[in-house]
Amino acid sequence: MAGTEMSNDHVVFFDTTLRDGEQSPGCSMTTQEKLTMAHALEDLGVDIIEAGFAMASEGDFAAIATITQAIRKPRIASLARAKAEDIEMAARALQFADRARIHVFLASSDLHLEFKLKMSRAEALEQCGESVRLARSLADDVEFSPEDATRSDRDFLVEIVRVAVEAGATTINMPDTVGYVTPEEYGAMFSEVRERVPAIDEKGVVLSAHCHDDLGLAVANSLAAIQAGARQVECTINGIGERAGNAALEEIAAALYVRGDYFGLTTSIKLDKLYPTSEVLGQLITFKPSPNKAVVGANAFAHESGIHQHGMLANPLCYEIMTPQLVGVAKTHLVLGKHSGRAALRHRLEQLGFTVSREELQQMYYRFVALADRKKNIYDQDLVGLLPDNIRERRSEPVSELD
Ligand code: KIV
Ligand code: ZN
């Protein structure tokens, strides 16, 4: 397959944290920070790192050039508008890469063509063909993205994809640039384009999904495209990106693994590096994922309600579809709060070295609930403070330190 790492049951992960992710508020990174992130992405096992947009700034150019010299396993990509100067600049930034990709994009929706580019459809087709041919003369791996593909006239989308494939594009990415479509529509678009452009399969061109999260559908849409034959997915760590963000890499990787029975596809992602990679990014930019973020949020493996905690203590499968360790999180947290039950309270007291009788637990429980009603977070010190002296004096070897 021209210039890619794909087999038919393998999904290529194209990480764009350093390009689409970085171009959102609070996420800009220095070259050194981008390099730190690129090392984390290499350890995570992503197939392709989009390291920046070479023409956008000197900083982006420098970051791409630096990353190509330090990172060996993933292919390195630079974004370029469908313009000769952009494409040549991308090629220069990538010149030291072992394996490089030039990613050319050109809007294909009438809205973008008319208002943003002031270009006719015919001009866009010509520019697409010329740009992809130029890029192919400079790199053997060229991706073409018809920007705003999901709001493009379908016949025109098919036409521009055909032109890009004929000009030598090795990957065709069809972005949902504004996060507009539903999973059914996005999947159907991939099936239709693939059927109407037979050269995609004849030449082994890889189809790629690139989704934004404006309606909270980015991951669902990406998975729908994969179901319809996309074998590359573009995503970012923690789902950072323009506006509401891009599809979150960790969610797609976890879904493909946990629901392997349904998807039957492989990836090169080392799942136990998901949380550590999310942590690296959280330290480099100005915010961390929200606590309820799937897979990597602080509450992704935390349980407060009594019924859930009781179930978790009996068998974690009751309320967890994957172990925290699978994605690199140390352990499940049974958080004590006003919804917790006696089982979790006893469990925590035992971890802290306090064994209590049924009656003692009952009394402790009343005091604990009264405190939890007044206080949002209950710490171990609060629990110890609630214990009567006779229990406190009986403390045995704790299995867990006070938090
Ligand atoms: O969202 C988008 O359309 C993009 C392209 C440049 C691929 O980021
Ligand atoms: Zn994008």
Image (cartoon, rainbow, N blue to C red):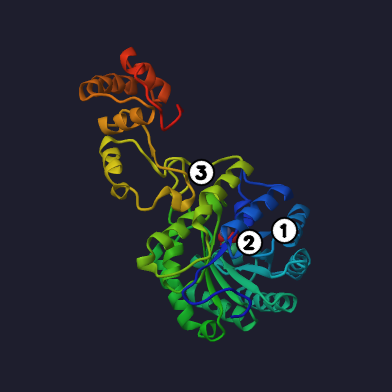
x%, y% of residue 18? 64, 54
**Mark 3 and 2 residues: CB-CB less than 8 Å, in contact?**
no
Give the CA separation, mark 2 to mark 1: 9 Å
Q: Which of 69 and 394 is in front in this view?
A: 394
Which structural element holds mark 3?
loop
Q: Which residue is drawn at 60% across and 58% down?
A: 16
Please state if 132 lies on the left or on the right of 95 as rendered: left
N-term mark: 3 or 2: 2
| Amino acid at circle 3 | Pro
| Amino acid at circle 1 | Ile
Residue 211 marker:
none
Which structural element holds mark 1?
helix
Mark 3 — residue?
Answer: 289
Q: Which quarter of the frame holds ligand 1?
A: bottom right
Q: Residue at x 77, y 56 (%)?
A: 62
Decide if ligand 2 comes within 8 Å of the CB at mark 3: no
Observer able to see residue 55: no
Decide if ligand 1 comes within 8 Å of the CB at mark 1: no
Quadrant of the rendered image containing residue 225: bottom left
N-term mark: 2 or 1: 2
Mark 2 — residue?
Answer: 49
Q: Give the quadrant of the N terminus.
A: bottom right
Give the CA separation, mark 3 to mark 2: 21 Å
Please state if 223 lies on the left or on the right of 144 as rendered: left
Residue 67 marker:
1
Please state if 203 lies on the left or on the right of 350 as rendered: right
Q: Which of 268 and 364 is in front in this view?
A: 364
Quadrant of the rendered image containing residue 161: bottom right
Determine the residue located farthest toward the top in the rendered image: 389
